[in-house]
């Protein structure tokens, strides 16, 4: 299942959203969900997506729909 969302003015798939967060290509991504928080930079809505940057790694990333802010659970 893939539901596209608008991020910074363009439609993105879950995989594309993950690639924006990762700033690189990813192998696979789960469905986009709404994160239960506001963007710390602009107060905009934040989306969340789980994805696999490589076979051995699973990352949950968050990205603002309105600005460049993003973060992952890596740290
Ligand atoms: Zn923002």
Image (spheres, rainbow, N blue to C red):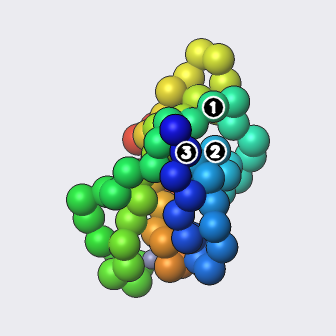
Residue at image mark 2: 15
**Dot 3: within a 10 Å radius of its alpha carbon, few (fewer than 14), some, or many (20 or more) residues?**
few
Q: Which residue occupies the extreme left position in the image?
A: 36
Whether residue 21 is visible, yes or no, is no
The numbered mark at residue 28 is 1
Whether residue 2 is visible, yes or no, is yes
> Looking at the image, is mark 1 or mark 3 earlier in the sequence?
3
Residue at image mark 3: 2
Q: Residue at x 37, y 72 (%)?
A: 45
State the CA–CA distance, disc 2 to disc 3. Answer: 9 Å
Seen in the picture, residue 57 relative to 16 is either above or below; the reply is: above
Residue 65 in the figure: left or right of residue 35: right
SS type, badge 2: helix
Given contact means CB atoms under 8 Å apart, are the residues at marks 2 and 1 in contact? yes
- Nearer the observer: mark 1 or 3; the answer is 3
Q: Which residue occupies the extreme right position in the image?
A: 25
Report whether the residue tagged 1 is closer than 8 Å to ligand 1: no
Seen in the picture, residue 54 relative to 11 is either above or below; the reply is: above
Residue 20 appears at what percent x and percent y? 65, 56
**Dot 1: within a 10 Å radius of its alpha carbon, few (fewer than 14), some, or many (20 or more) residues?**
some
- Nearer the observer: mark 2 or 3; the answer is 3
Report whether the residue tagged 3 is closer than 8 Å to ligand 1: no
State the CA–CA distance, disc 2 to disc 1. Answer: 6 Å
Q: Residue at x 65, y 17 (%)?
A: 55
Residue 19 in the figure: left or right of residue 63: right
Residue 38 appears at what percent x and percent y? 30, 71
Q: Residue at x 34, y 57 (%)?
A: 34
């Amino acid at each position: 299942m893939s539901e596209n969302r608008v991020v910074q003015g363009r439609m993105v798939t879950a995989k594309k959203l993950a690639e924006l967060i990762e700033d690189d290509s990813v192998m696979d991504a789960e469905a986009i969900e709404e994160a239960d928080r506001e963007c710390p930079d602009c107060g905009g809505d934040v989306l969340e997506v789980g994805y696999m940057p490589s076979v051995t790694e699973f990352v949950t990333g968050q990205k603002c729909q309105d600005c460049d802010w993003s973060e992952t659970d890596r740290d």
